[in-house]
């Protein structure tokens, strides 16, 4: 699994803490972490939580990432932005129980964590616990297990609804403000990671056109 880490500007100072906790948990599982920043509050590429949604959608829909770890001060804005796009099911996760139940019941592909609200002493440990429970077993198995059948059925229904209610990503990207999208894709390592791992030719061509490549 390839996991993308994305931080918005208000919480960029915590990027290294989040990356360390994430890698500590998932690298022994054989997963890869691509850190898309922001890396520091002074980064030239400043990401808002709206741009997090754009970047997450590009990465997940193109296959450049299998999962996105993100957040903002409360976690709410980043979650809403991510869920504004097709191909993204993002849960709001504050603790290990949230992480486990979201993975098992909702079977999503992104989580948004509050990196300011309630993030005090022991915040790094809480992140480790979240990541451990998020990836401790195959997602979508249901919780409790006797609810597995209706929960899987509901997830399939949600996927079908989203397929109808969302347009294709390239059409969306082309109609959004061009500078807003460029800003979302302007991180220091975006092109390095994205171009190496993108699996969708249409999205690759769309991103190159937007970036003027």
Image (cartoon, grey):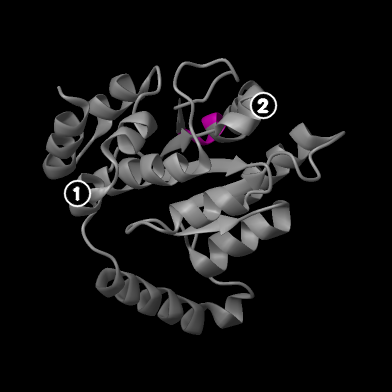
Taking the magenta stretch, the answer to whether it contains residue 136 is no
- Asked if residue 54 is positioned above or below residue 158 in the image, the reply reads above
Q: Earlier in the sequence, mark 2 or mark 1?
A: 2
Q: Disc 1 on helix, strand or loop?
A: helix
Query: Between residues 73 and 151, which one lies in front from this camera angle?
Result: 73
Which of 94/54 is in front? 54
Residue at image point 12% right, 36% down: 205
Q: In this view, does 14 lie above or below 76?
A: above
Q: Position of residue 61 (x, y in %)?
A: 28, 49
The residue that appears at 46% across and 41% down in the rendered structure is 52
Residue 105 visible? The answer is: yes
- Majority secondary structure of the magenta segment? helix
User: Residue 112: percent from the left, percent from the top?
Assistant: 58, 49
- Coordinates of residue 84 in the picture (x, y in percent): 41, 58
Q: Which region is colored magenta?
A: 27-31
Q: Which residue lies under the disc numbered 1?
A: 170
Query: Does the image show residue 66?
Result: no
**Residue toward you, 126 or 161:** 161
Say whether residue 30 is magenta.
Answer: yes
Above or below residue 185? Residue 202 is: below
- Indicate the quadrant where residue 202 lies: top left
Secondary element type, mark 2: helix
Residue 14: mark: 2
Asked if marks 2 and 1 touch (Cβ < 8 Å), the reply is: no
* Residue at position x 16%, y 29% in the image: 208
Left or right of 127: which side holds 2? left
CA gap, disc 2 to disc 1? 31 Å
Q: Where is residue 160? Give x, y as percent.
A: 30, 75
């Amino acid at each position: 699994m390839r996991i993308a880490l994305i931080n918005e500007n208000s919480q960029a100072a915590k990027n290294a803490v989040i990356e360390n906790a994430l890698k500590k948990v998932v690298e022994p599982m054989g997963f890869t972490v691509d850190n898309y920043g922001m890396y520091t509050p002074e980064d030239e590429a400043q990401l808002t939580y709206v741009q997090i949604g754009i970047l997450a959608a590009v990465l997940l829909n193109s296959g450049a990432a299998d999962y996105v770890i993100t957040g903002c001060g409360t976690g709410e804005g980043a979650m809403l932005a991510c869920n504004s796009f097709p191909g993204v099911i993002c849960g709001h996760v504050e603790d290990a129980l949230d992480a486990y139940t979201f993975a098992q019941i909702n079977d999503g592909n992104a989580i948004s964590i509050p990196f300011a609200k309630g993030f005090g002493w022991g915040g790094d440990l809480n992140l480790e616990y979240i990541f451990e429970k998020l990836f401790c077993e195959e997602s979508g198995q249901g919780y409790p297990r006797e609810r597995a059948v209706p929960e899987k059925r509901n997830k399939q229904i949600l996927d079908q609804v989203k397929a109808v209610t969302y347009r294709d990503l390239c059409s969306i990207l082309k109609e959004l403000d061009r500078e807003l999208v460029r800003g979302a894709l302007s991180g220091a390592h975006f092109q390095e990671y994205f171009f190496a791992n993108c699996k969708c030719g249409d999205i690759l061509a769309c991103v190159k056109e937007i970036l003027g490549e």
